[in-house]
């Protein structure tokens, strides 16, 4: 009886909301599918290198967490996150220059959730958000869900052109300023200290929150270390940090560093979303950080990614035809390229796939739909050998298709 009724169900007619129906599949996920075809080398995803995951130390941390906390680390826990980890993160943020208390830290399920919580909390349909043009595509996905609009600001090698922000604010009355100010995804560019200060001044003048999404800040290979937006802007800034690129993304543990006066609002929003982040991986990361190995581990990541970046840049110099330009980031996971006029990153991708190499074309990163002549290359995930092959292949594709 019940089974027969079930056969009559027409779930595809169930009334999804218009904003769910308008969700698009992530183009990057689609590109990642072709990237996993046999023999294809992917420079597409933003994956950290699996060789860099501290597997044995995490195994020990997992055991230590169970030994010390027993069933507590498998139980429901606080929406704000476990106090031990919040305290550890606050101390680290302070050490890195942003004076932070445990009361400022909310543990999230990835910094992607931090972006989502911010959007839930502030964005009504039609509200504007100031973003860099281009910006992180995952943030655009999260913001689009809330039907936001974008006041886009162009970039140069010093980051967002902050002198355009005030006009954008006057014109669009935005709810948020979202930036990836350090080793930006997708460009690898870092905002200069002067620009950060100017942006903070504008944000304070109009009382608009700056959301500084900072997953890559600790991965600096060259150049002098700069103060973060949070260190400079204090309560003018909500910053998002994550262990995805410094430990392992599958643990899904990240944090918001948020003004104390409003963190209880985010606590409630977080409760609605998923009650709390994974209890066990929070304890695991806490024990891993307590073991004192984290700093040494980050140094190893920096040495490895720095070597890969150097190799990729050297090979691009050798194999890419004149007329293509690219960034020289001091850290992070990505290089960003610009093809000469008339060439399209999206149209060239199928030819690159034929040549058994993939990248992400740039257009999805541009809220204003421009940027078809751009592309992003990831240097963290492939090995030195595969990077060598991949850049040779890509250079050939570009040379054969120059206008
Ligand atoms: C700028 C930026 N923000 C957020 C994220 C999401 O990271 P997480 O794994 O912490 O959710 C990424 C991941 O690539 C990113 O590049």
Image (cartoon, rainbow, N blue to C red):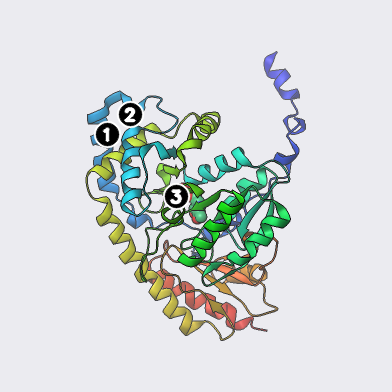
- Vertical relation: 188 (above or below) 72: below
Q: Earlier in the sequence, mark 1 or mark 3?
A: 1
- What's the CA distance linking mark 1 and mark 3? 33 Å
Residue 284 placement, left or right of 394: left
Residue 301 lies in what quarter of the image? bottom left
In contact (CB < 8 Å): disc 2 and disc 3: no
- Image point 49% across, 61% down: which residue? 197
Q: Which mark is residue 73?
A: 2
Q: Is residue 379 left or right of residue 178?
A: left
Badge 3 is on which residue? 234
Q: Is residue 37 visible?
A: no
Q: Residue furthest top?
A: 1
Between 352 and 212, the one lying in front of the other is 212
* Residue 211 position within the rendered picture, expressed as x and y whole percent measured from the top left: 53, 50
Which residue is found at the position 22% from the left and 30% from the top? 67
Residue 263 pos. (x, y %): 48, 36
User: Mark 2: few, some, or many residues within 10 Å (few <14, many ≥20)?
Assistant: many
The residue that label 1 is drawn on is 65
Please tell me how crowded label 3 is: few (under 14), some (14-19), or many (20+) other residues with Cα within 10 Å: some
As drawn, 318 above or below 146: below
Of callouts 2 and 3, which one flags the residue occurring earlier in the amino acid sequence?
Answer: 2
Give how far apart the Cα atoms at labels 1 and 2 are. 7 Å
Residue density around tag 1, few if under 14, some if 14–19, many if 20 or more, within 10 Å: many
Cα separation between marks 2 and 3: 32 Å
**330, above or below 144, in the image:** below
Q: Earlier in the sequence, mark 1 or mark 2?
A: 1
Asked if labels 2 and 1 touch by Cβ distance under 8 angstroms, the answer is: yes
Which dot, 2 or 3, sits closer to the camera? 3
The answer to which quarter of the image holds residue 136 is bottom right
Residue situated in front as seen by the camera: 348 or 21: 21
């Amino acid at each position: 009886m019940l089974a027969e009724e079930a056969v009559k169900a027409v779930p595809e007619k169930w009334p999804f909301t218009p904003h769910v129906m308008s969700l698009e599949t992530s183009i990057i996920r689609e590109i990642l599918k072709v990237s996993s075809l046999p023999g294809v080398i992917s420079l597409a995803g933003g994956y950290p290198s699996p060789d860099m995951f501290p597997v044995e130390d995490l195994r020990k941390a997992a055991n230590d967490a169970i030994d010390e906390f027993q069933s507590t680390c498998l139980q429901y826990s606080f929406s704000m996150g476990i106090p031990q980890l919040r305290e550890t993160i606050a101390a680290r943020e302070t050490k890195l220059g942003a004076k932070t208390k445990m009361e400022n830290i909310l543990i999230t399920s990835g910094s992607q959730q931090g972006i989502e919580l911010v959007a839930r909390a502030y964005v009504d349909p039609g509200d504007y958000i100031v973003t860099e043009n281009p910006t992180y595509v995952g943030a655009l996905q999260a913001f689009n869900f809330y039907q936001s609009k974008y006041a886009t600001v162009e970039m140069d090698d010093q980051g967002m052109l902050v002198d355009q922000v005030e006009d954008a604010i006057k014109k669009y009355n935005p709810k948020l300023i979202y930036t990836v100010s350090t080793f930006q995804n997708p460009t690898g560019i870092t905002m200069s200290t002067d620009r950060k200060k100017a942006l903070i001044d504008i944000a304070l003048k109009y009382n608009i929150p700056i959301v500084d999404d900072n997953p890559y800040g600790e991965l600096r290979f060259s150049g002098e270390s700069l103060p973060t937006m949070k260190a400079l802007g204090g309560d003018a800034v909500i910053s998002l940090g994550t262990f995805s690129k410094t430990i392992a993304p599958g643990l899904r543990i990240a944090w918001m560093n948020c003004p104390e006066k409003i963190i209880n609002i985010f606590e409630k929003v977080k409760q609605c979303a998923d009650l709390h982040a994974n209890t066990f991986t929070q304890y695991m990361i806490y024990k891993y950080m307590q073991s004192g190995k984290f700093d040494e581990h980050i140094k190893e990541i920096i040495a490895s990614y720095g070597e890969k970046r150097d190799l990729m840049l050297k090979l691009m110099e050798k194999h890419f035809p004149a007329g293509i330009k690219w960034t020289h980031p001091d850290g992070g996971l990505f290089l960003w390229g610009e093809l000469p006029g008339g060439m399209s990153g999206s149209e060239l991708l199928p030819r690159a796939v034929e040549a058994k190499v993939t990248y992400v074309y740039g257009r999805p990163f541009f809220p204003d739909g421009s940027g078809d002549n751009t592309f992003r290359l990831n240097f963290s995930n492939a090995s030195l050998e595969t990077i060598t092959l991949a850049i040779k292949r890509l250079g050939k594709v570009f040379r054969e298709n120059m206008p």
